[in-house]
Amino acid sequence: MKQKLYTTEEKICILREVDGGKAIIEVCKERNFSEQTFHRWKREFGMMDISEAKRLKELEKENTELKKMLADAMIENLRAVCGFGDRSRRARSSGRHVLAEGWDGCVPGRRPDRT
């Protein structure tokens, strides 16, 4: 049986129905989900309002974008420190990616060996 995916707003509305006086079992049977699911939603969303849930979703999205930006900046920094410019190419060697040009043994946090 395919499960229905409830939006965050729908989950909060269902939690508020129980706060309004309906029995948990009754709401679960009407909506066709288990009591365990209800209690998981209650633990996750608790006394959150719909506006707070929307703000939480926005913050999570912004956080994801910031993490991607940080990862990109760290990669660019590594390239600059290790001397990987636009010249670097990726070559395949035995199924693993290896930098063909520009590799001088640079490892983050260590100085490259200059012999």
Image (cartoon, rainbow, N blue to C red):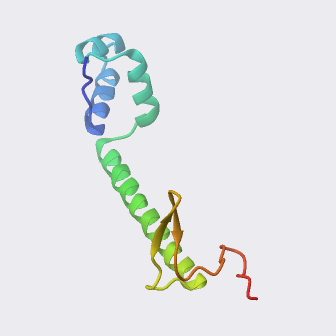
- Foreground pick, 72 / 37: 72
Q: Is residue 105 above or below residue 64?
A: below
Q: Quadrant of the C terminus?
A: bottom right
On screen, residue 14 versus residue 109, left or right, reads left
Q: Residue, x 43% and y 85% (percent of image)?
A: 86
Residue found farthest to the bottom: 115
Q: Quadrant of residue 105?
A: bottom right
Residue found farthest to the front: 94
Q: Is residue 78 above or below residue 26?
A: below
Q: Position of residue 34 (x, y in %)?
A: 36, 16
- Foreground pick, 33 / 106: 106
- Foreground pick, 75 / 39: 75
- Foreground pick, 35 / 61: 61
Q: Quadrant of the N terminus?
A: top left
Q: Residue, x 31% and y 28% (percent of image)?
A: 16
Q: Position of residue 23 (x, y in %)?
A: 33, 12
Q: Is residue 42 above or below residue 95?
A: above
Number of numbered discs visible in the structure rendering = 0
Q: Residue, x 59% and y 79% (percent of image)?
A: 103
Q: Position of residue 81 (x, y in %)?
A: 59, 84
Residue found farthest to the right: 115
Q: Position of residue 54 (x, y in %)?
A: 30, 49
Q: Quadrant of residue 78?
A: bottom right
On screen, residue 101 versus residue 22, left or right, reads right
Q: Quadrant of residue 26?
A: top left
